[in-house]
Image: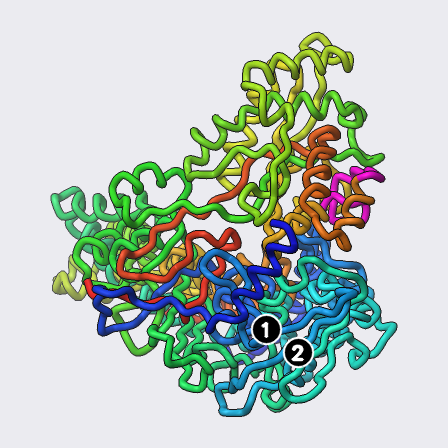
Amino acid sequence: MFAYIMRRLAVAVPTLLLLIVFSFILMHLAPGGPFTQERELPPQVLANLNAKYGLDDPLWKQIINYIWGIVAHFDFGPSFVYPDRSVNELIAAGFPVTLTYGSLAFVAAVAMGVGLGVVAAIWHNSFLDYLAVGISIGAQVLPNFVMAPILVLIFTLWYGLLPGGGWSFNDPSFWIMPVIALGTSYMASIARITRSAMLEVLGSNHIRTARAKGMPEHRVILRHALKPAMLPVISYLGPVFVSMITGSVVIDIYFSTGGIGKAFVDSALNRDYAVMMGVTILVGALTILFNLIVDVLYAWIDPKIRY
Amino acid sequence: MTKLFATTALLAAMTLPAYAVQPAEGETLAENQTYNFWLLDAIKSLDPAKNTDVEGSDVLRSLFEGLMNEDAAGAMIPGIASSFEESDDKLTYTFHLRDAKWSNGDPVTAADFVYAWQRVVNPDTASEYAWFIELMNVVNATEIVKGEAAPEDLGVKAIDDKTLEVTLTTPTPYFIKTLSHATTYPVPQKVIEEHGDAWTQPGNLVGNGAFVLTGHNLGVDITMEKNPQYWDAENVVMQTVKGITVNDNNVALTRYQAGELDRVDIPAGQYPRLSQEAPDEAISIPYACSYAYVYNVSDKGPEALKDVRVREALSLALNREILVNNVLQGGQRPSTTWTHWAIEGFEQPETELATLSQEEKTTRAKELLTEAGYGPDNPISLTLQYNTDENHKKLAIAAQQFWKPLGVNITLNNVEWKVHTDRMQNQDFDIARYAWCADYNEASTFLDWFRTDGYNSGKWSNAEYDQLMADSKTAEDTGPLYKRAEEILAEEVPAVFVYHYSTVDMISPEIKGLPTENVLNTWYAKDLYRLAD
């Protein structure tokens, strides 16, 4: 197992390098640059800016300098659009925000989604099943860009219970609406996947055997049904976790959290090359890491899987 | 406005004490003197040399103060300069600075301005607004930006601690009006050298404005508290000023209604409803920006648009009343000139476009196209390019419909902002949506755009126009020159002028002192106060 993990981590390095090189080239292929603006800059001002940020070097040299900066100093460069800040600072400011509301939403979505799915599967075709399926379909069809303004309308404007947006690490009242708006549709998907996986497992031979030997129903469900039913859920959760903690542009826009999701989309539109690269690498590294964690979890859950 | 009047108004202002809005008699101040204003986006930089956007300037105006300020009507009034003299040849200005302090207690000196201006043009700073010092025509600004002269050679000198001398390359009628712009604010050399790029962080930032920075969560909020060291602190009522970022205009409106914000823009199309529901909160005031469809008349442009008759026909056939009243619905005005109607001293010429009825204009448009050899039997195909935005799209669709009966088939081309800008600057378009906002309250800020060496992405060029704009720099009375320039634009039609902007906002009735007559929409938190409700 240890050798397997080491092997995977070793493969991660060239994967990330390829990601960097491809993203870098694609980004520079897009028309316009960070300093393209309505008020065309005088050529000399533009030249000064390009020189300061190293954009006048040939592309291959820029890529090498960039990678060297990361390897040697863990420096992701300066932001072109936020001249007072470096990419490291921007990520250090925005990532903890999305990490907070993202992981809370993840925990809530998993707990409720798995709960709903299990309930629906156990009491298949009963009122509880229809209710659980109803809730998850309702949550699925209500996208977060509809959910977010509705939440603000209800909790801020009508009842004045929660702040309509903004962020504070010290005051959880700022976290509630982002967590609900982000978690809901994921909860719905998790519930549906859990339900169908559970139904399949509950109909399998080993469950019939367990019941036949007189095992109490709660032990059948918890030990013999839930564990294998989690396999498809876990393979779904790996990438979902990464996408939740690296933020959602919709949540960041509606709740003005200052999170990294909006920073990423903005950086693409603004051609803020360094910020875009920084977030791409962050998301890429996390994706590689969590895919590995999912695979390790697989082996732990399913005795048939050995690395 | 004639220059004579401008100077008189300025001198009159000079003899008065500095302007500060004060509560009127009978008004009761709220205990909580806080003003929460809306920011659409994160503030990109709090460094006056590096700030490039309007929202950043709104914040910088509270943290710093330049030589001049603007009053509620947009007239220039003394800021850090208590008075100034202009030399007879209009090339040298001498400013006398008042006793003012930085927020750390150090005195504000002429050397602070010298350092700040040199820093803006210094290529090492790589300021995106270095062109602003060039626009002011300060001696050697262009050479320094090009790296051909040292920053120390800039035409700005500290005669002593309280006297600043600026020399210009050419008489510049609008020079004084540029001095309230954030790019010209003084900056604290000691602090910048100590902290580097991090000098704009709360705790590090030292300013000379009425407020000090106490908190900044990028993309969330920015908090400023009253600065006890400010020279006019006794006349500042507001204690806390907070900019709150809300990236979605509709959510911002909801949060305004929930009392979290004191001022927000009204989302497109909602002004008629809100001005009915809350007439004392919904305002529409002129804002010095001008919207146009620019024709590409360069070599790379379509053949049909090289014919002035075609260009004029499209302009005449565009029913601006409908665009403004049925699409935008926010108190904007249909435009017949490039210069915004509310710009100080600007007189609109009488043109066909301004005087004929829409029916007459449409008839005339058809005649012009027939003369040019086009019409429904021989249609023209053109693309209209605009950047992604709901309003641009609606207007473009309407324009397409107005031009279709003439036999002009428009293909709409919606592209992302950077692509739009890049294509415009490379003349890779037929007709493109464009807007320009004034840098200062004078017509040349618009008219310079169409000079042959102006931004002018359509590459229209006219020798008489260039001469007029050159002459206007030294003219005693610029009014007739600007009027003639607009007449040339009306005859030559390098672009379809569509409408002049207005700002449509909700303002809390508790907040007083926000100017509603300044066409640049400049406001100073030091002039605000909150009434008890």
Res B176 quadrant in image = bottom right
Q: Nearer the viewer, residue A3 or A30?
A: A30
Residue farthest along the top direction in this orientation: B377
Q: Secondary structure at mark 1?
A: loop
| Magenta residue check for A138 | no
Which residue is label 1 attached to? B67
Badge 1 crowding class, 10 Å Cα cut-off, few under 14, some 14 to 19, many 20 or more, is many
Task: State the count of labels.
Answer: 2
The reply, left or right, for residue A266 in relation to residue B260 is right
Query: Mark number for residue A110?
Result: none
Q: CA distance from mark 2 to mark 1?
A: 12 Å
Identified at 66% across, 78% down, the residue is B116
Query: Mark number for residue B116?
Result: 2
Chain ID of residue with mark 1: B
Instruction: Judge whether A122 appears above or below A284 on screen.
Output: above
Instruction: Judge whether A252 appears above or below B154 on screen.
Output: above
The amino acid type of the residue labelled 1 equals Leu
Badge 2 crowding class, 10 Å Cα cut-off, few under 14, some 14 to 19, many 20 or more, is many
Q: Position of residue A222 (x, y in %)?
A: 21, 65
Res B87 quadrant in image = bottom right
The span shown in magenta is B449-464
Identified at 82% across, 35% down, the residue is B300
Q: Main secondary structure of the magenta part?
A: loop
Identified at 22% across, 59% down, the residue is A115
